Amino acid sequence: MADITAEDLRAAVAAGQLSEAQAAGLKTLAETRAGMRQAEDEPFELFRGFSEIFVTVGLGILLSGAFGLALATSVPVVMGLAIVALYFLARYFTLTRRMMLPSILLVGAFGTAVLLVAADLLSVQWYQESTIAGYSYSRFDPVFEVAQAVSIAAVTAGALLAWFRVFRVPFTMFLVGLTGFGLVISLTMSTGYEGDNPFDLLEGSAMAWGTLVLGLAALAGGIWFDMRDPHRLGRLSSSGFWLHLVAAPALVNTVAQTFLAMGPGPGYVLMALALALITLLAVVLDRRSFLTAGIGYLIFLLIYVTDRSGEGKSWIFVFLGTGVLLTLLGSFWIEARGRIMRTLPDFPGKDRLPPYKNDLTI
């Protein structure tokens, strides 16, 4: 008898033979019996066997040669051919063979190839000045640099989204987020930031506001995917996982660094409140990446509060206590989340979030 795969369950849901909740319950039961995971876990998969690793090593060597050839000869020509080859490789390894790790490598190589081609074609050498639409652009004009960075990021992100539409590789969403972060860095460099903390919103740097906008956009995208796959059966929730992995550090670091720069007193109090809200957000969305991103700041605050002697020795007990707390929270996450979600009043979209009962109805 053949094993029932996640693709089989998705097909059964699409055919109306199982409800989404029934398919999720069946998948959870099978995985729990196999000792793989508990209900309401965050499915995460990089590869399904050593054959995928072996194929990925071969593809990695092949692609390294291709990128080396491009840099040694002509980036647009060689990378253009590589993009075509990557498309057909993905049709085989992603659509036909359903290999996870090779698919991740191929979309990463595709995004890099598009980035190199776009950067090469859009990096026009302006000798002195060029006039476009009545405006004179110098080679080092910040306006030109910003337009160039935005154009390169837009082309790369657009190509990645087109790849996702065809091949549905969840890791693509992480690369889209990285493209956005690269754009933020480019804009920060173009504006010539000279402050003390690039993540301090009060300083008004492009980095701080850019990461805030990027984090909010990634969070919105992650929630959009999550709400369309609340039982986390397929690629939609996995795509949401990668977007939350972008959103968490972008939002947590920007907000925490802003309050940290305000110093002891109101700044630290606001940081504690922000961490509490982030914890609640992590529980509601059932995404632990937000908690993980805030652990360092939590430890900092606890050391600051408990170090009354000024000798800096309280970190030992803070580490012990935090370690115990996180271990317990991770072990009893399902039960804790269920109680919190049942305590919270109804709000829009609550019924479209991951289930929070102790068991799934089959």
Image (tube, rainbow, N blue to C red):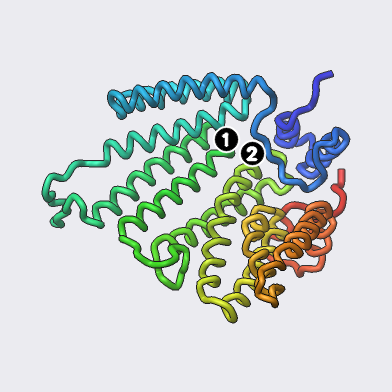
Residue 100 visible in the current orientation = yes
Residue 289, x across and y down, in percent: 65, 53
The residue furthest bottom is: 265
Q: Residue type at mark 1: give it.
A: Val
What residue sits 66% from the left and 59% below the top? 295
In the image, residue 326 above or below residue 201:
above
Look at mark 2 in the image and give the residue it sits on: 235
What residue sits 38% from the left and 67% below the top? 195
Are discs 1 and 2 less than 8 Å apart at CB? yes
Image quadrant where one finds the N terminus: top right
Query: Badge 2, how many Cα within 10 Å: few under 14, some, many 20+?
Result: some
Tag 1 secondary structure: loop
Residue 43, x across and y down, in percent: 71, 41
**Foreground residue among 19 and 302:** 302
* Residue 169, label in figure: 1
Dividing the picture into quadrants, the one containing residue 294 is bottom right
Residue 281, x across and y down, in percent: 67, 62
Residue 85 lies left or right of residue 22; in this view the side is: left
**Foreground residue among 361 and 6:** 6
